Amino acid sequence: MPFRFDDEPSVHALQILADAVEGSYVHGVVELRTLRNAIDDALKEQTPGALRAAQVAFSKVDREFQRRIVEKARAIALQNAAHHPADAA
């Protein structure tokens, strides 16, 4: 399913990813800073090009950091669902 900026759950998922990157951020790791900035740009600009840049930035992050980010994003999503069960349905 393609990402749509007019779809609130999709944008919320991108925000969760941004929070996960921030929570996994390690000072001095350029790829993480690039990813963080690219996701912020995608959220601000809401264009396919900005979203693609974020995807490319994620693909350049070390696999271990990718795994950490995904785990952190899942934890954030589960926590959000527990606090807002009506939103998860």
Image (cartoon, grey):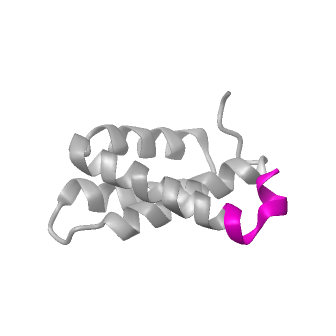
Q: Measuring 54% from the left and 53% from the top, which residue is drawn there?
A: 42
User: Which region shows up in magenta?
Assistant: 81-89
**Residue at the limit of the structure toward the top, as seen here:** 1
Question: Residue 44 location in percent, x, y?
Answer: 59, 62
- Residue 87 painted magenta: yes
Residue occupying the far front of the picture: 82
Q: Is residue 67 above or below residue 24?
A: above
Q: Quadrant of the N terminus?
A: top right
Magenta stretch, main secondary structure, is helix
Does residue 14 appear in the picture of this structure?
yes
Q: Quadrant of residue 36?
A: bottom left
**In this picture, is 4 found above or below 71?**
above
Q: x, y percentage for residue 55?
A: 43, 40
Position in image of residue 83 (x %, y %): 71, 72
Rendered residue at 54%/63% (across/down): 76
Q: Residue at point 22% right, 46% down?
A: 64
Q: Is residue 59 left or right of residue 45?
A: left
- Left or right of 43? Residue 5 is right
Q: Is residue 48 above or below residue 27?
A: above
Tell me the residue at 61%/52% (across/down): 13
Q: Is residue 46 left or right of residue 72?
A: right
Q: Position of residue 63 (x, y in %)?
A: 24, 41
Q: Does 21 appear above or below 62?
A: below
